[in-house]
Amino acid sequence: MKRHKINRCLIVCDGYIGKRLLNIYLKKNEGSSFAIISADGASNVLHLLNIKPRYIIGDLDSIFPDVLSSFINSGVSIKRIIEQEHNDLEKCIMFSISKGMNDITVIGYGGNRIDHTINNFSILKKYYKKCSIRFIDDEFEVFMINKKTEFDYKRGEIISIMGFPKADGIVTEGLQYPLKNESLEIGKREGALNRAISDKIKISLKKGELLIFKKHFNTF
């Protein structure tokens, strides 16, 4: 029998892991085909929560030896990658793409160290054109665009959009503070803490890239 190909994965990083968020994600996706990929030290949390990943990837300098042994004994595939040119999140993304998993959700991308968090946003920028990739935390879904997007939303809720590092010709619909062929750029003008006044949000730009923070409402 031919094995069904999996094209979706959940990457769990070793930052702040919202346990409630993780449980909601797993419950909503119960019965669907996706792989859990643990980035090195995140495996310690997954072990405590009795969640078994399909893969553990990284240089394995953060995972506890007993946790590693337990997952090996339970059949988890371990991919030790010792090179230091890429961090563990990027190693997980590269591995996912190599396996044809091009629909990627990332949990635990930030919260412990600001330098790691900013670095992970840089990785998001590096890969968002190669695959569908989004970061989620307890409140927001974070993704990037370089052309346009539209999505359903709740009136009155916060949405932030930021040039990363710069975006020109931005046009928005459905926001309290609309942009009409305007620019956003880090260090010059930000678009944080805007608010929805419509059930449908539309954002487009002519040049550059936008980092978008939108409430996910547990819809993933």
Image: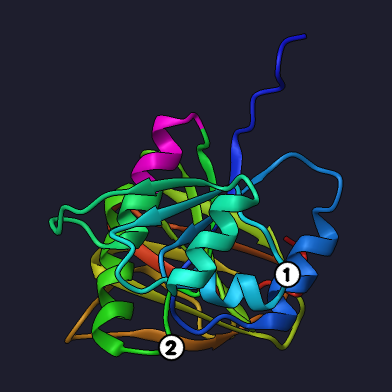
Q: Amino acid at mark 1?
A: Asn
* Nearer the camera: disc 1 or disc 2: 1
**Relative side of 78 to 166, left or right:** right
Left or right side of 188 for 72: right
Q: In which quadrant is the C terminus drawn? A: bottom right
Work out how far the residue at label 1 is from the one at label 2, CA to CA, in angstroms: 22 Å
Q: Does residue 212 belong to the magenta stretch? A: no
Q: Nearer the viewer, residue 55 or 67?
A: 67
Q: Is residue 117 visible?
A: yes
Task: From the image, tell me which residue sits under label 2.
Answer: 111
Question: What range is drawn magenta here?
Answer: 93-100
Secondary element at image label 2: loop
The residue identified by callout 1 is 50
Q: Amino acid at mark 2?
A: Gly
Image spot of residue 51 (x, y percent): 70, 64
Residue nearest the observer in this picture, 78 or 13 = 78
What's the magenta bit mostly, secondary-structure-wise? helix
Residue 81 location, x and y as percent?
Answer: 27, 49
Disc ID at residue 62: none
In the image, 7 versus 19, the foreground residue is 19
Quadrant of image for the N terminus: top right
Q: Secondary structure at mark 1?
A: loop
Q: Residues within 10 Å of mark 2 (few under 14, many from 20)?
A: some
The figure's colour scheme reads rainbow
Would you identify the image quadrant in which residue 3 lies? top right
Mark 1 nearby-residue class (10 Å; few <14, some 14–19, many ≥20): few
The residue shown at (21%, 54%) is 82
